[in-house]
Image (cartoon, grey):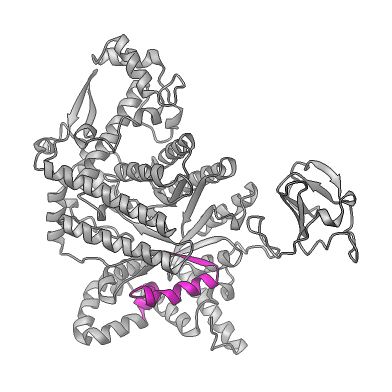
């Protein structure tokens, strides 16, 4: 049996709040609990039975309770106080409680779920799902086809078509302790050849003829027709293709409406966006290469080779090292290098680290000044200039303006924005621009969240560097941790083009990377605060790890510092038990007209087909709950 004593601050004395399992305080008509009760200077203290975990350090004794009159003490009865730890009924980490997992579903919805997940296991249906859906639409006509989809796949994976139709679904989720991450999931299903043409045209500047020179540009950051259709080999992520500025403006309005809907349907909602929806991808390619090349020069100057297993934040350049390296490269004299050193050393600690160095790339400068990448040839340092036409420079400015408009609206509507990760040849720029948005909009609370793909070898170093920047500059840091959605495509591209595979060698390595990033994030929350993370995963071991580490560090479920995220229609056996126990858990909630979300439904079918073990367990629990309802005579269960 565990007891909890919570001390609430007051101007003269701490207020005492004891959970009702302990009993009321001594006073007229009250009895005294057994043993000696102390007023403590700590915010929260737990008294545990002898069999509990190792004791915490003893709280400071500032007086026996017998010396306090009842006028000085406020008695508060509560079942479970936010942030104070788990409620008396602990979370079942086996995630096998079918009644709790599916109590938000009617019996008909539960039967539909069993059927849909079963259909996802038929390889023929999954492989030819696009053709079958297209044929069904022609055969049945629009009305019958939409009715069939709403009764099956659409009804299971999608919340509805618009704000009025999704509101009841979101309200039902909220009643069971689950929030919503809204995503307007309309996708343009363009032909393969059209996608390739659009990608190549939008990734190569008319003014930069050097782009075709393999000797000058890093292979990873060049556009290749074979990989022009970024949808190939990807089943769990949406893809945007650039056609013109008007299309980007349309995407902006769609995303702004999604933020408005999130604000109107929830007090603490999220919205997911992709930066490739907002502008020409060429700038992301070019800026990514600048960032990577700038980092390579720093590693060269600090005498290190690029190694994802080494903590990049541990590398430092002294003034003498910096001067010697610049002289060796024939850039400047020792006197001039001293001036440069003082300018680059942002925190003025007498050393240049990675964060100081990367501030050389400033996205708020004129683009012609940004897009100059340092390039080492032997012992010499050259500058590789990316040439943009005036029109392309204006297009890039508009992309940044669109991102800024989204963030401003999110702040106004009290909605948090998660910027999704994308392919590695875009990601350095996406991550950098997202952190710049954090700098501006996360001053008082986390509004912007960056996404970290833990299947990448460099995930830990990137996360640590961004967290350190947030600490130095005092803004709130928001992160979503995922394993990643582009593994097969990334590996094949690296092999074909001839650069290092950016993905961890094994699934076990990715799990280790995820837990390492998660542990660092939780440690930062416990030590510094001003950090929020979304643990976006369907992996039960990772959820267990997060819950156990939160308990060890004293991070309460209702502190709302750690969020859990799963897809609508999947992993309910995790989401709803977490929600019932007070954890901050969210469903990724897609919405949009039936015919326009077909590409999304196609991806969900493919993803479920590839998750045989997890889906089989879900169906088992669903059947178990159906059997329980029949035996209990609760077949007409209403959430």
Q: Is residue 473 left or right of residue 305?
A: right
Q: Is residue 54 left or right of residue 450?
A: right
The spot of residue 291 in percent (x, y) is: 29, 35
Residue 498 shows up from this direction: no
Q: How many marks?
A: 0
Extent of the magenta region: 152-181
The spot of residue 378 in percent (x, y) is: 22, 20
Look at the image and say whether residue 163 sits in the magenta stretch: yes
Quarter holding residue 113:
bottom left
Q: Residue at 32%, 61% (x, y): give it.
A: 256
Task: Give whichever of 155, 181 is nearer the camera.
Answer: 181
Q: Residue at 57%, 56% (x, y): give it.
A: 544
Above or below 289: residue 235: below
Is the N terminus in the top left, top right, bottom left or bottom right quadrant?
bottom right
Look at the image and say whether residue 170 sits in the magenta stretch: yes
Residue 137 shows up from this direction: yes
The spot of residue 214 in percent (x, y) is: 15, 35
Above or below 51: residue 587: below
Quarter holding residue 443:
top left
Q: Is residue 509 left or right of residue 52?
A: left
């Amino acid at each position: 049996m565990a007891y909890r004593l919570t001390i609430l601050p007051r101007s003269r004395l701490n207020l005492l709040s004891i959970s009702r399992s302990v009993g009321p305080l001594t006073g007229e008509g009250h009895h005294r609990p057994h043993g000696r009760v102390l007023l403590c200077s700590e915010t929260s203290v737990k008294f545990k039975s002898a069999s509990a975990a190792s004791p915490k350090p003893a709280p400071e004794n500032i007086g026996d309770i017998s010396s306090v009159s009842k006028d000085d003490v406020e008695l508060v009865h509560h079942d479970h106080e936010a942030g104070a730890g788990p409620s008396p009924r602990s979370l079942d980490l086996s995630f096998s409680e079918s009644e709790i997992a599916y109590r938000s579903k009617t019996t008909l919805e539960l039967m539909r779920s069993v059927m849909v997940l079963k259909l996802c296991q038929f390889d023929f249906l999954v492989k030819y799902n696009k053709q079958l859906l297209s044929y069904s639409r022609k055969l049945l006509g629009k009305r019958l086809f939409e009715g069939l989809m709403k009764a099956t796949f659409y009804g299971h994976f999608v919340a509805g078509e618009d704000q009025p139709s999704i509101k009841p679904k979101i309200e039902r989720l909220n009643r069971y302790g689950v929030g919503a991450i809204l995503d307007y999931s309309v996708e343009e299903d363009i032909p393969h050849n059209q996608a390739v043409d659009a990608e190549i045209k939008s990734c190569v500047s008319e003014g930069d003829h050097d782009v075709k020179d393999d000797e000058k540009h890093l292979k990873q950051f060049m556009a290749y027709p074979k990989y022009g259709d970024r949808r190939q080999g990807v089943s769990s992520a949406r893809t945007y293709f650039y056609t013109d500025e008007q299309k980007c403006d349309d995407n902006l309005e769609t995303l702004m409406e999604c933020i408005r809907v999130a604000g109107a349907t929830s007090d603490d909602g999220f919205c997911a966006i992709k930066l490739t929806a907002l502008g020409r991808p060429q700038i992301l390619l070019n800026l990514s290469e600048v960032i990577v090349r700038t980092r390579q020069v720093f590693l060269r100057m600090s005498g290190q080779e690029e190694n994802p297993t080494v903590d990049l934040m541990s590398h430092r350049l002294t003034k003498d090292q910096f001067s010697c390296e610049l002289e060796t490269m024939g850039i400047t004299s020792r006197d001039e290098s001293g001036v440069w050193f003082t300018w680059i050393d942002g925190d003025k600690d007498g050393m240049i680290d990675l964060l100081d160095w990367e501030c050389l790339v400033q996205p708020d400068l004129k683009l012609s000044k940004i897009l100059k990448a340092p390039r080492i040839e032997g012992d010499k340092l050259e500058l590789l200039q990316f040439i943009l036409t005036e029109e392309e420079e204006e297009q890039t400015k508009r992309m940044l303006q669109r991102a800024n408009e989204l963030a401003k609206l999110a702040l106004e509507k009290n909605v948090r924005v998660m910027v999704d990760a994308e392919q590695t040849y875009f990601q350095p720029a996406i991550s950098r621009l997202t952190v710049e948005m954090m700098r501006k909009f996360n001053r008082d609370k986390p509004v912007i969240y960056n996404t970290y793909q833990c299947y990448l070898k460099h995930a830990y170093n990137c996360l640590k560097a961004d967290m350190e920047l947030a600490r130095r500059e005092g803004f709130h840091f928001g992160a979503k941790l995922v394993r990643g959605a582009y593994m097969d495509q990334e590996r094949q591209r690296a092999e074909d083009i001839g650069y290092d595979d950016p993905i961890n060698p094994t699934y076990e390595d990715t799990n280790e990377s995820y837990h390492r990033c998660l542990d660092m994030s939780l440690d930062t929350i416990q030590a510094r605060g001003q950090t929020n993370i979304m643990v976006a995963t369907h992996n039960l071991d990772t959820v267990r790890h997060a819950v156990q580490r939160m308990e060890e560090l004293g991070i309460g479920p209702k502190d709302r510092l750690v969020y859990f995220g799963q897809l609508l229609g999947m992993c309910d056996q995790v989401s709803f038990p977490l929600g019932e126990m007070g954890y901050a858990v969210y469903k990724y909630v897609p919405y949009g007209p039936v015919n326009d979300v077909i590409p999304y439904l196609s991806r969900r079918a493919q993803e479920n087909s590839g998750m045989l073990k997890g889906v089989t367990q879900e169906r088992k629990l669903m059947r178990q709950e159906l059997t329980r309802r029949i035996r209990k005579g609760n077949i007409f269960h209403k959430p």
